Image (cartoon, rainbow, N blue to C red):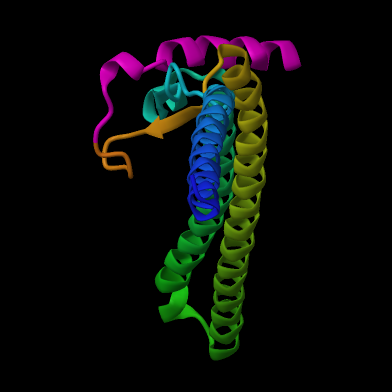
């Protein structure tokens, strides 16, 4: 066998060894990577049960939630009181006008001017009182409503976490939520828990 033939054989053997080494290395590398990939997939956050979503009918809550009923009663009382004050002023104004109209034919000019001035002043007073009471009632309504919203939101945060819900949504006819499956309705349970939480906070 000539020297050139030996060189060719050595080259072929070297190439074969290199190919076998590459194949072995590649197989080993792929085998080692498989468990790592599976492990990475396993540690991804899994949403096995899906989102826990429920809803409450806000109209029903407003009707049976004791805190809401208290707020509504308080607001109704304040409106009635304001209306009563304004009505008493109107009655006084109407009586004064009627008296003026009856006695006007026999009054002197000076007396007419004095009575007319008194009526105008009372009319202005009524308008001022009406505006003041309206602003006062609006301010009280805002304060009570904000108090209701803040406290009820705090209660709902506690209740939602305790029950394990991700979202508790509000539903009402004509509201933003157009459809809600009844099996997700927890209105009655929420009303009971809200009333219990409200009573304990008194």
Number of marks in the rendered image: 0
Q: Is residue 71 above or below residue 12?
A: above
Q: Position of residue 68 (x, y in %)?
A: 54, 27
* Along the viewing direction, whichever of 88 and 45 lies nearer the viewer: 45
Q: Main secondary structure of the magenta part?
A: helix
For the point 44% across and 31% down, the residue is: 169
Residue at coordinates 27% horizontally, 36% vertically from top-left? Answer: 173
Query: Which of the image's four quarters has the C terminus?
Result: top right
**Image spot of residue 25 (x, y percent):** 57, 34
Left or right, 174 with reference to 107: left
Residue stretch rendered in magenta on the structure: 179-202
Which residue is at the front of the view, 198 or 118?
Answer: 198
Q: Is residue 183 magenta?
A: yes
Q: Is residue 202 visible?
A: no
Q: Position of residue 184 (x, y in %)?
A: 35, 18
Q: Residue furthest bottom?
A: 109
């Amino acid at each position: 066998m000539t020297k050139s033939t030996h060189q060719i054989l050595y080259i072929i053997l070297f190439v074969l060894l290199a190919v076998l080494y590459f194949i072995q290395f590649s197989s080993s590398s792929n085998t080692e990577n498989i468990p790592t990939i599976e492990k990475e997939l396993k540690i991804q956050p899994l949403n096995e049960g899906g989102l826990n979503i429920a809803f409450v009918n806000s109209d029903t809550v407003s009707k049976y939630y004791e805190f809401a009923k208290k707020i509504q009663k308080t607001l109704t009382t304040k409106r009635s009181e304001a209306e009563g004050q304004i009505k008493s002023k109107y009655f006084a104004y109407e009586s004064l006008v009627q008296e003026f109209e009856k006695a006007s034919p026999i009054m002197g000019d000076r007396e007419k001017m004095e009575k007319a001035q008194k009526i105008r002043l009372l009319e202005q007073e009524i308008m001022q009182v009406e505006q003041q009471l309206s602003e006062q009632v609006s301010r009280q309504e805002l304060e009570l409503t904000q108090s209701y919203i803040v406290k009820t939101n705090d209660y709902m945060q506690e209740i939602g976490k305790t029950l394990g819900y991700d979202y508790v949504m509000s539903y009402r006819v004509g509201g933003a939520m157009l459809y809600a499956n009844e099996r997700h309705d927890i209105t009655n349970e929420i009303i009971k828990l809200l009333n219990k939480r409200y009573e304990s906070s008194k």
